[in-house]
Image (cartoon, rainbow, N blue to C red):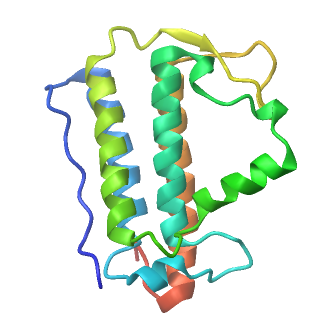
Amino acid sequence: MTTSEPTTQAPTAAVTGERADILESLAKQRHFLAFTTRDLTDDQARQRTTASELCLGGLIKHVTEVERSWVGFMLEGPSAMPDFSAMTEEDFAARADTFRLLPDETLAGVLADYEKAAAATDELVATVPDLDRRWPLPKAPWNEPGAEWSVRRVLMHLAAETAQHAGHADIIRESLDGSKSMG
């Protein structure tokens, strides 16, 4: 089984200005991430090609989960996310499957799920009343205690994280079969 080039859907509401810029940035980074999976089989999407535990299907799953988590945060605040500071090694080990394309999962399925998550994020960008709405960050060893992020800051973080993982994906893909996203 192969996949065709993934696409992203525009939000239903027409947006302009800063919101349009945010949507364009997210769409560009999502495109490069998903594009690295073009024409791969499920087995290829599961394959680790570097010293890292990462695989292409797992990266798509991870970014999907990240988008959903942060959408929850933008709508409900830190209660929508886990208390990472209270997680045990076993909890983190259980989350490791979010970085793998499991035997019962398909690349087409995780890409479709990613598109749904992206559409929900895009709809939020188009409709959230205030990009300046702030929430305290969830408890996590990597978050400064008492720090707050606005909806705008979360969206910037999503674009940056997606771009970072698109770079990871490009290295994994090039190691897999020599294909590159650019160049």
Q: In the image, what residue occupies the spot 82% across and 31% down?
A: 85
Question: Could you say where residue 127 lies in the image, as x and y percent from the top left?
Answer: 27, 18
Question: Could you say where residue 17 lies in the image, as x and y percent from the top left?
Answer: 25, 22
> In the image shown, does 52 or 100 lie closer to the viewer?
100
45 relative to 96 in the view: left or right: left
Taking the view exactly as shown, the residue that stands out farthest to the bottom is 177
Q: Quadrant of the N terminus?
A: bottom left
Q: Is 114 above or below relative to 148?
A: below
Q: Is 87 above or below relative to 109?
A: above
Q: Is 5 above or below relative to 118?
A: below
Taking the view exactly as shown, the residue that stands out farthest to the front is 104
Question: Could you say where residue 62 lies in the image, as x and y percent from the top left?
Answer: 54, 53
Q: Quadrant of the C terminus?
A: bottom left
Q: How many marks?
A: 0
Question: Could you say where residue 28 lies in the image, as x and y percent from the top left?
Answer: 34, 50
145 relative to 81 in the view: left or right: right
Q: Is residue 7 visible?
A: yes
Q: Quadrant of residue 49?
A: bottom right
Q: In the image, what residue occupies the spot 31% across and 50% down?
A: 115
Q: In the image, what residue occupies the spot 33% across and 15% down?
A: 128
Q: Is 74 above or below relative to 27?
A: above
> In the image shown, does 175 or 86 lie closer to the viewer?
86
61 relative to 113 in the view: left or right: right
Q: Quadrant of residue 167?
A: bottom right
Q: In the image, what residue occupies the spot 68% across and 59% down?
A: 96
Q: Is residue 141 visible?
A: no
> In the image shown, does 42 or 9 lie closer to the viewer?
42
